[in-house]
Image (cartoon, helix red, strand yellow):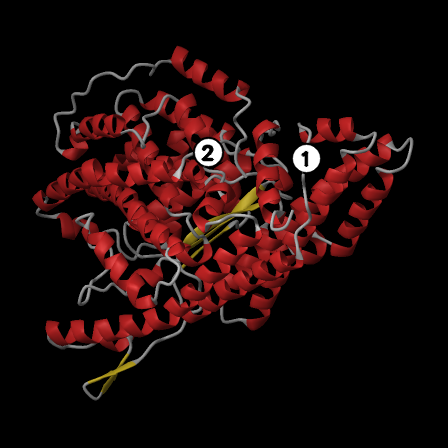
Amino acid sequence: MKNRTQKCMVWVMLLVMLFSVPAYGQYTGNAPYAQRNIETTYNLETAKQHIAQLQEALHQKGQKKEVEKLYDLVIEDFDRLATVVSMTQIAYDKNVLDAQAAKQEAYWKNIYTEQYDRIYSCLYDGFSTEYAAILEKKIGTILPEGYTAMSEKAFALSEREQNLVQQYQQAAAKTYTVNVDGVTWNDETLEQSDISDTQYQKVQQALAKEKNKALGNCYLQLVQVRKEIAKEAGYTEYTKYATDMYARDYTAEDAKQFCSNVKTYIVPLYETIYKQIEKNKDFEKELASFEDNATQDIMDRVAVVVENISPELRKIYTHMCRNGLYDFDEPKPERVGGAYTVGMPYYKDAYLFANKENTYSDYQTVLHEFGHFAAYCFDETPELFRGFSVDVAEIQSQALELLALHEVDSIFGERADTYTLMELSDILFAIMSAAMVYEFEEVVYKQPHMTLDDMNRLFADIQTQYHAVFFPTYDNACYDWVDVTHLFDSPMYYIGYGTSAFSALNIWLLSQQDYEAAVQIYLDITKYASNSSYQNIVETCDLENVFDAKDVQQMTTSIAQTEAFGGDGVMQKTAGLNWHGLLRVLWNMLSSHRLSAYM
């Protein structure tokens, strides 16, 4: 059947994750990052040879041991390849204007897609041979029927998408200039200028519009390419394709209900905490004390927090720092923006990449990304079968940010309350912005002929519905949405920040009653949930349902009663927060066949 290639690949991974049994453990690698390189990590020709040899052995009699050995080599090779992809991405992101680094990153990402396809084709073939039982035991399940190798068109579209993402990153790194009233301006000269507020806004609008035009045109092309990718995969719309790609276990209707719940309950809660911020007369002064702190000071303070939360996390954090598995540096024009963590499955660990903001958010960034780092280290599932559910992964990061609030007195002293207020307000804003971005993408990918002007007006309209100024608005148009990098490199991803942030707040709320129990729930999710789907985790851990208006209302009411939000701190005890309950939760997680339900 035509156009079923990528759809098959998506569902293959979903079903393999659904029934396979992932391995849980800790990192074993101990090689400093400076000693890791492509040449010693991966050899493409050797990897291709191993696949060919496995294919041949599968069709010969009496090759049980050979099949087992070659299967292990193929799995290890793919772990090595994924590690190389991460290393080339890091090198490119340090300087997106480096043509050679850009070429290397694109090359290895294409190789990843090709090798993935070769291996799955081989394994599918193997399940029709006498060695099917061996493969089933190795993988943990029998593969579903109906796999078709990727078409040439699918490969070409994937390559086109990657090239457009690089074009966006390179365009974002450029300096834009405009001529306003006979004067040439850029962002730097504008910030250094001494002009009236009216003139400042006029120049700011012109610069935003110029950048929007360049980056927005990249986005228009990406949207069309992605619609073609979905069509080639057998989907009628990209939103459904993305839902399967991220292995989400909630529907578009659920997502709409999420947005409605956010507007009804989260927005007022956000406004409540801002009233608390306004009451603090010394707030700006205290906030300024977080500015321009040295990287080492930030890393050391976070180390104290992590150690107090969990000895297991402390061990991983020490491993990360000792082996130079992070790049937390000043932002530069040529450096990709934002922060992320990528896995290095061959070494059983990961790498943290982030840009300093030189504000209180630097502490949040390290804690957030370290949550991802720890999850990678705990999960020993081979790369070929490893899933990624943003809705679960972002619990692992955002809940750590919130649990760290328990320790802020020891590292921030009298500034602890200020940091706490900003962390809580930022988590709420993450929920709101996730809903806003989802509404934007949902319209963009469904409307057939949207122009850039349409998109600019759409974003401006959506953000007003959340009573928040996500970006400045000029004449009913918003231009700065092009700075949301996820729109370009991770389409339809952003809603996961909102669903997970709600669950992270749920864990924080539980911590107000029993901190150790809440930490244990967090560790269970970080250790055992990396191959699960979002609603499975919510159900298994007895958390509130972000898609249920009553649950959201109840939780926001409880949060508003906490001292941090200006309440009296008196809350009704939540059922299940005891060690017997926790053992039950852990047993459910370990025994549930649904724990690996995403790719």
Q: In the rendering, at what x and y percent does residue 232 appear?
A: 57, 53
Amino acid, disc 2: Leu
Sort mark 2 into few (<14), some (14-19) or many (20+) by Cα contacts within 10 Å: many
User: In which quarter of the view is residue 380 placed?
Assistant: top right
Asked if residue 355 can be seen in this view, the reply is: no
Residue drawn at x 22%, y 71% is: 205
Residue drawn at x 69%, y 51% is: 115
Residue drawn at x 30%, y 33% is: 505
Left or right: 2, with 584 as reference point: right
Left or right: 353, with 510 as reference point: right
User: In which quarter of the view is residue 156 placed?
Assistant: bottom right
Of all residues, the one furthest to the right in this rendering is 61
Between 231 and 198, the one lying in front of the other is: 231
Disc 2 to disc 1, how far (Cα)? 41 Å
Labels 2 & 1 near each other (Cβ < 8 A): no
Q: Which residue is mark 2?
A: 313
**Foreground: disc 2 or disc 1:** 1
Q: In the rendering, at what x and y percent does residue 282 appear?
A: 11, 48
Amino acid, disc 1: Glu
Q: Which residue is mark 1?
A: 145
Q: In the rendering, at what x and y percent does residue 215 appear?
A: 39, 68
